[in-house]
Structures are given as structure tokens and as C-alpha cells.
Amino acid sequence: MGEGAVAVLGAGMAGAAAARRLVEAGFAVHVFDKGRGPGGRMANRRTEADLRFDHGAQYFRARGDAFRARCDAWVAAGVAAPWGAEARFVGVPTMTAPVRDLLDGVPVSSGTTITGVRRVGARWTVTDAAGTTAPDFDAVAVTFPAPQVAALLDASGLVLPGIERATYAPCWSLMLTLDADPGLPHDLLKPDAGPIALVVREASKPGRAAGHRLVAHAAPAWSRAHLEDPREAVQAALLAALATVLGHPLHPIDATVHRWRYAMVETALGQDCVYDPAQRLGAAGDWCLGPRIEAAFDSGQALAQRIAADLTGAR
């Protein structure tokens, strides 16, 4: 890769924010991600019936100046749009759009599971599950969920202290297509109790196709209790629970579920990132600051800033 090259592992919001900041600072960046495309938990699923669902994060808000400026730019470019009340934003045409915008022009190796990182002298190599090695990086930024960061570092004989303190709640996500209006009283509903924590009318979001599509997220406690249950059993249980929430039976045309093992941060580190300048190895994600897309953005930018300052000083 040459002088000033950085490997960013993970193409969710934190990885994309880190990559964009490093590119803007003049460094060569290569992103590696195990998914079929960028987005991470800002994910979009195309079903066998060619229907699209935002089955991960449903929206984001902007509290700080940096993320607010980025959101304003996305809205101006048609990459995001306001949705409903409470200053919510969504990606357009799917939730992955803001991440894809940050990664525009950045080399991304999708479908690539990184299984090891190794420091050789002053440089790094990364190795994927197929045994392919990408050499010659000056620094590595890991933006996986914290347990996956810890597992990668352990497999590589490396340590970044404190990562083990971050914890997550899991989530089962139900994607549902109906032949009639389901009678959801609002475009976004958060039941007070029961297995269902969130229900969203997919077509209510800007840029989405018309139709009667719902996304329901199971509550953390329910998801944890049923994390290893068969998908068919989870789907049936959530469908019944959603029918109870709506007050009538549901007869789906199409239904599927997705398990998010690391869905929402429960315990964050309370720091913007983790970085070891002696190794030029760092990690970032919402698990550093809290369960928000903005927190992932801020963490990725903070790690990139540390790496950029380090590499600039070494030139």
C-alpha cells in the first residue's frame, strides 16, 4: 500500500466515518467487511420476493455539530431525509445510503471476513478467512462490535485494554408483508411491554416503495431468552405477539426474521475510541460512546483523527 496506508476493518457507520476522515487527511485507505455490502447495522434486506426492508437501525438523530453538519449535507444531496417527528432522519432510498456516501471512492472489499492481523516490523498485514493476506499497512482501525474486536485481537495475540467492558443486547427482527393495511396507529410504535419493542411502517419513510410492509424488533430480554431458538419458532412467536399489539390476526404474504447478536449497546466505555500509538492499532464503534448512530460516527472520526495525527508526525 505504501506510506500512509490504513486498513479499516468494518464498513458500518464507525468504519465509514473513520475511512472518510482518513481519506480527507490524505491517507490511502482500504476497507474490509464481511457483509455483502456496506452498512453494518444500518442494514437493508432484499427478500426473495424482491421486497426491501430496513431491518437494522430504523433512523438516526443529530445532537452534535459535526454530525449535524454531515446530516445537513446528506439531506441536501438526497442521501438522507427527515422522517416523522422528533428530528428523526433516515437514509434514502435505504438506511445504508449515508454509509455508502461516506465510502464513495474508497476501496472496499465486501464479503471478506478478517480472521487475523499481524504486525511485521513497523507495518501490518491483515488475513481473511480464505487465507488471503493484504500486507503493508501503517495502521489498523477495527470497527466491529466490541466482542468481535476482542475475538479478532485474541486470535491475533493482541490486546487493547478495556474493550471487554462493552456489552450488547441482541435483537430478533421480523420483516412482514401484508395484503392489507395492518392498522398500525402510527408510522412508528413502541409498545410499553411484551415481546415487541418497536414496530415501523416501512413505506412511511421517504423514498420507499408503497405497500403494507412492517418491521418489528423484539425486546432485548425476549431476544436474549430466545437467541438460539429455531428461526421458524421465532418468526411464529413474533408474528403472534405483533398480532396482539395490533389487536387482530395477521396473514402475511411474506415473512422472515433476522438475528442481530450484537444489536444495541447496553454498556459503553465512556470514551471516544481505543488507540495504542505504540502499535498504531485502534478500535472504534458505538460501544465507545453509546447506542446511537451518531456515537458510531463520532467514534470513527475520533479514531481516524488519532491515527492521522500519529502518521502525520511520523512523516
Image (cartoon, rainbow, N blue to C red):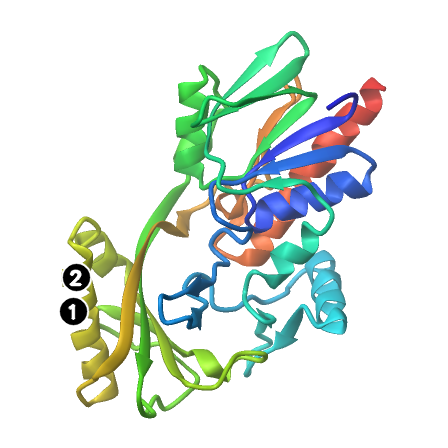
The answer to whether residue 301 is visible is: no
Q: Tag 1's secondary structure?
A: helix
Q: Residue at x 43, y 69 (%)?
A: 53
Q: Position of residue 288 (x, y in %)?
A: 52, 42
Q: Position of residue 169 (x, y in %)?
A: 33, 51
Q: Furthest-front residue in view? A: 49
Taking 79 as reference, is 253 above or below it? below
Tell me, yes or no, whether the two marked residues, 1 and 2, touch with CB atoms within 8 Å.
Answer: yes
Q: Amino acid at mark 2?
A: Glu
Rendered residue at 39%/36% (across/down): 147
Secondary structure category for the residue under label 2: helix
Residue 9 in view here: yes
Q: Which residue is mark 2?
A: 232
Where is residue 1 drawn, in percent x and y? 73, 24
Q: Is residue 210 left or right of residue 257?
A: right
Q: Residue at x 27, y 71 (%)?
A: 255
Q: Dot 1 corresponds to which residue?
A: 236
**Residue type, mark 1 in image:** Ala
| Rendered position, 49 above or below 149 | below
As drawn, which residue projects farthest toward the right? 315
The label number, if any, that marks residue 164 in the structure image: none
The spot of residue 155 in percent (x, y) is 40, 20
Q: Residue furthest top?
A: 121
Q: Pointer 1: residues within 10 angstroms few (<14), some, or many (20+)?
A: some
Q: Quadrant of the C terminus?
A: top right
